[in-house]
Each structure stands twice: as C-alpha cells, then as structure tokens.
Amino acid sequence: EAGVTQFPSHSVIEKGQTVTLRCDPISGHDNLYWYRRVMGKEIKFLLHFVKESKQDESGMPNNRFLAERTGGTYSTLKVQPAELEDSGVYFCASSPLIVGAEAFFGQGTRLTVV
Amino acid sequence: DAKTTQPPSMDCAEGRAANLPCNHSTISGNEYVYWYRQIHSQGPQYIIHGLKNNETNEMASLIITEDRKSSTLILPHATLRDTAVYYCIVGGGNSGYALNFGKGTSLLVTP
C-alpha cells in the first residue's frame, strides 16, 4: 500500500516567486493535514482537511498561504509570494476518519527561499 | 502549546531497553497518547498510541499509568537505527486531530 506522497521533495525559489506543494494521501483517508518545520523550530500544525472541507486552518501563518483539496483526494499548498522566512520542511499527513486513528506522514518537501 | 513534558535527551546502550517517559497531567478523558519519532529530517514516523490500556506492537510498548497523567514508551531492544527525536503527543478525541509536537526527547543509542 502506497504511503503519503509529497511532491517535490526539494524546491528552491527566489523571494517573491510562487511555489505549489502537492500531497497525495493514503487512499481512503479522509483526513489530510499540513505541518511545517522551519529551521530550529518545532514541527507546527498548519491546517486540517476533512475530505474537501477545511476543518481547522488555525495554524496557517498568513494569507500568502493557500491550501486546497478539490475532490477530497490530493491537496496542494501554494505560497504566493514566497518570503525568506517560509523556508523549511513542509509535511503532509493523512488518517482515516476514525476517532483517535493515527496519522501517517509523508517525507516532506524541503522549501528554500533565496 | 504542547501539553506534554519530556526530558530533552536520553542515552541508551545498543541492545538495551529504552524507556522514554512523558508527563501529560492535563490530559482529557477522551484524549489519546501518541508517540511519533523523527529520524534526521525524515517525516515523523508513527510508533504507537493508546487511550487507557497498555499497548504493544512490533515496534514498541506503551505503558499508561492508571490516572493517565503519564506514560512510558519502551523500545525493548534499542538499535543504532532507533536514534531519533521521540515525540509524546496527546490529542484526538474531542480536541480534534491536529498533533501538537513539542520539543520531544532526543534519544541517542550508543554501540
């Protein structure tokens, strides 16, 4: 069974450019989460989808970040325009819609803004 | 804000059991205790979780105290590949599914 897949694994962009990260969750997992870890900091929650609906986006840092999950399958996280402080590793996770079920993480996308 | 307390670092000799403690004195009745680990910069890896009872799987055992205010993750025979940062997280239940990673415990397994 395929795990959570993230694309690309690495991205280097210039300040002011746009970057779109993609996450393919485990098939059948209605819950999808985005997290990120910036240099020297803890892993932080960004947002949570249940199917195509945003359940909790309290962790999104500002309106330069836009997450979508059209059709309730894969998700994208767009950063526009990117700033230097957006550099870090962005993780996606998914879990089934069962109370207490564990979440499985992808390997992350390392974003570097120069 | 993390609702758990873990020691910042621990050492363990290869082949020995690694016992990682976690305090979660404010845990709610329907919250679970989850353990994840992160090896280098890889994605967090799920280890085990439990609600009230002790749990065991192929990776580890989880011992939860009767009052649920603390727990211990046990890696029965630690290997060098178990060197990682281990995170104890409480959540699920009515608090939603977002995992609140704290600083975790950096476990170093030595030869």
Image (cartoon, rainbow, N blue to C red):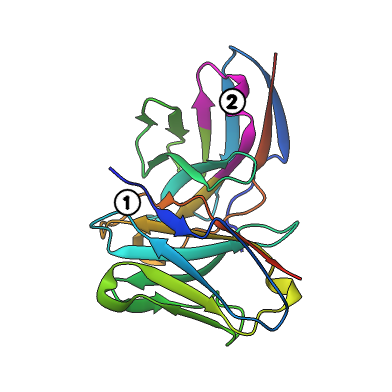
Residue at the spot x=57%, y=45% of the render?
A: B42
Stretch of the chain drawn in magenta? B73-87
In the drawing, does residue A65 fall left or right of residue B64? right
Is B80 in the magenta?
A: yes
Residues marked 1 and 2, same chain: no
Residues at marks 1 and 2, CA–CA distance in whole angstroms: 26 Å
Residue A27 is one of the magenta-drawn residues? no
Q: Is residue A63 above or below residue A90?
A: below
Say whether residue A71 is visible: yes
The image shows residue A87 at horizontal and vertical percentages of: 69, 67
Q: Which residue is mark 1?
A: A101
Amino acid type, callout 1: Ala
- Would you call the spot at circle 1 few (<14 residues within 10 Å), some (14-19), or many (20 or more)? some
Q: Is residue A107 above or below residue B60?
A: below
Q: Which quadrant of the view contains residue A67?
A: bottom left
Q: Amino acid at mark 2?
A: Arg
Q: Is residue B97 visible?
A: no
Label 1, secondary structure: give it. loop
Residue A93 at x, y = what percent? Answer: 43, 57
* Relative image position of residue B30 (x, y in whole percent): 35, 56
Q: Chain of mark 2?
A: B
> Closer to the camera: disc 1 or disc 2?
2
The C terminus of chain B lies in quadrant: top right
Q: Residue A69 in the image: state x and y as whole percent.
A: 35, 75
Q: Nearer the viewer, residue B7 or B46?
A: B46
Residue A111 left/right relative to B48? right
Q: Residue furthest bottom?
A: A63
Q: Which residue is mark 2?
A: B81
Residue at point 50% right, 18% down?
Answer: B76
